[in-house]
Each structure stands twice: as C-alpha cells, then as structure tokens.
Image (spheres, rainbow, N blue to C red):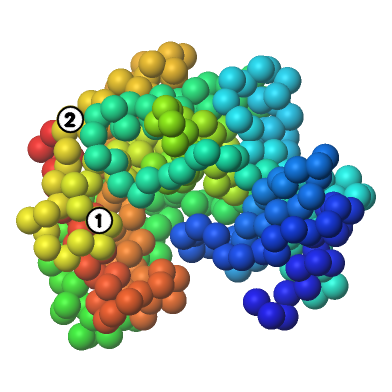
Amino acid sequence: MSNIHFEEIIHSFFEEEILLHPTPFGSGHINDTFKFSIQKNQEQQDFILQRINQNIFHNPQEVMDNIQKVALHLAKNNYPKKILSPVLTHENQSFHKTETGEYWRVFPFFKNTFTIDKIDNETQAFEAAKAFGEYLNFLKGLPPSALRTTIPNFHNGVLRLKKFENTLKTATETKINLGLVEIQFIIQHANIFEKIESLKLPIRITHNDTKINNILLDKTTQKAVAVIDLDTLMPGIILSDFGDMVRTFTNSGEEDEADLSKVEMRKDIYLALEAGFLSEMKDLTKLERDHLSDGAKWITLMQAVRFLTDFLEGDPYYKIKYPNHNLVRAKNQIALYKGLLLA
C-alpha cells in the first residue's frame, strides 16, 4: 500500500483537500478497495476508491463503459433507488490510468448503509431478490448489445465441464482419488449443462453476481438501498441471476462448511426469494419461468465443477486457507445441489 500514490490518483478526480486518506474497506476478494474522505461544499464527503483487478477483468475500460451506460439509463428512467455511478476524472473519464497501467475508479459512499453475508430469514430474502429483480427490470429498455462481455463464457456450463474433463486427464492420482466421489457425481449429472444450453433462452442484461452482500441495506429500515458490484454486468440469461441467488441465499451453511450435515437447501428462503424476484420480473417468458428451478441446479453444479477443477489443478484460481479447501467447497455445493433435486 505504501507504493500507491493515493494523492495523485484522488486528485485526478477531485481538487478538494483530502481529509481522511484511503484505508482498506470491505471484504471483497477481486478488486482492492479503499474508503477516503474529502472536504467538499463545507462538509466531509466519503468515497470508495478501487483498483480494478486486471487479472480478472482484462479490459477495465469496457467494465467501466458498461457501468456508466447502465447508470445513465437508470437515471434517465427514474430508477427509484440509489445508482452506483462512477465519479468522473477532470478529463471526463470514468477511471484514472496510472503510468504503470493500473486502473483506478471512484464511487460515492452511501451513508447509513450496510451489507450482510448470509440470509437469516424470509424477509431478507424477499427484499434482496425484489431489489435485484427491480434493478434488472429497469434495464430491459437497454439493449443487451449495448454492453460488452466483461468475462467471456463466465456462466458457460458446457465449457466449464470441458475444462473439468480435460483437467481429469492431467490431475495427479492422489487428487483424483481424494475427489473420486465428487468426480463421479458431476459426470452423472452433467446433462444439466447441455439442457440449459439447448433452451436458447432470451439474452438480457444480467448482473451475474447476485449474492446478498451485493445489496446495500438501510441501517434504519433494513430496506434495499442500492445494487452494487457491477463489474459482471453483461449480456446473459436470467437463470444466471436467479440461480446464483438460490445458490448463495438458500444454503443453511457457509460456502466452505466442511460438516455437510449443516448444509441444507432452505425451502422457505427459496420460496421468499422466488416471490420477491418474480414480483418485479413480470415479463419473463413462459420458458424462463418454467426453468427457473433448473437454473438454480445449473449454477450450483457449475460452481461445484469450478471448485473441483481448481482443486484438481492445484488451486490456481480460488484462494485457499488449507489443503483440500476447494474440495471441501465442491462437496458443499454438491450437497446443496442434492437439496435442490429434492425440492
């Protein structure tokens, strides 16, 4: 952090005095995030400063163009919640590029808000799903072709499966044996990926990371204030967003809970989530509605494939805290998938 020239970066956005210098903020695993304050209009104003992770997002300008287009569209169409819109530099850019090629951006900090990492009850599930549904509903007037794909094939289950199958050919015998039960399970249930691909569902603008902690909540009312973490806004199918909500909302345990007796698909949370989402997304086609539950299975098993592939490859993508961490995560997602099959 000592090598980051914060003042130079911030002053590319603001001329005002920096009151509180950037300090690390939040629990995100992708971008480096900081909070800082400046003196503006006789008062202290807080902002979020982020360095975009170019190992994940190879074209940061496309990421920022997408976010800016969506923000302008929402503002033009009187979107009722707060809009995460980038602060522009003095050169009217949505990012500052340093001499070393790093991309930095600034967003306003929304006061009196908080996030949660785990759904505790149906009210939270309904409120968060309704907020995501409302957000996507307001984007239906913006053509999906207006946005660029920030991570190609992000939710392409067929390609994820092919990578998994190729990894099986090169993985060590030790790892194959450790994950044999999970490997066999995925092979037995892999037809879900071809099934979703064959549906040819409508392409919409989707968020693609609909976790509960990507909804800002009001500290007083507990109501949704804003949808955040917009880097994966891009063309996709609605099952991506519904499925990822189910995957992350309904699990009774943490994503890396090793005690599988604690991993249960909470049907009450699922029903509240579905009700909240559909209360806003009223223009879904019959085909989309009919396959929402398949979308939940598809995304959950895809995540199991990703964790297991990473384990077999030697953990190059997901950070681990102990050996076999990614295998534990894969077992967890398979347990959740089994719960979805019984729902």
- Residue 99: where, in percent of width, then height? 85, 72
Quadrant where the N terminus lies? Answer: bottom right
- Look at 17% across and 30% down and name the residue there: 268
Q: Is residue 282 left or right of residue 299?
A: right
Three-letter residue code for mark 1? Glu
Three-letter residue code for mark 2? Asp
Q: Name the residue tied to disc 2.
A: 268
- Look at 44% across and 71% down and name the residue there: 317
Classify 38 as above or below 148: below
Quarter-wise, where is residue 10 in the image?
A: bottom right
User: Element at badge 1?
Assistant: loop
- Residue 36: where, in percent of width, then height? 68, 57
Q: CA distance from mark 1 to mark 2?
A: 17 Å
- Residue 218: where, in percent of width, then height? 47, 33
Q: Local crowd at mark 2 within 10 Å, few (<14), some, or many (≥20)?
A: few
- Look at 53% across and 27% down and name the residue there: 135
Quadrant where the C terminus lies? Answer: top left
Foreground of the two, 112 or 34? 112
Which numbered marker is on residue 299? none
Q: Is residue 66 visible?
A: no
Q: Is residue 297 left or right of residue 81?
A: left
Q: Is residue 13 visible?
A: yes
Q: Local crowd at mark 1 within 10 Å, few (<14), some, or many (≥20)?
A: some
Residue at the limit of the structure toward the right, as seen here: 91
Q: Is residue 298 left or right of residue 71?
A: left
Q: Is residue 212 left or right of residue 11?
A: left
- Look at 92% across and 50% down and name the residue there: 91
User: Element at badge 2?
Assistant: helix
Q: Name the residue tied to disc 1.
A: 254
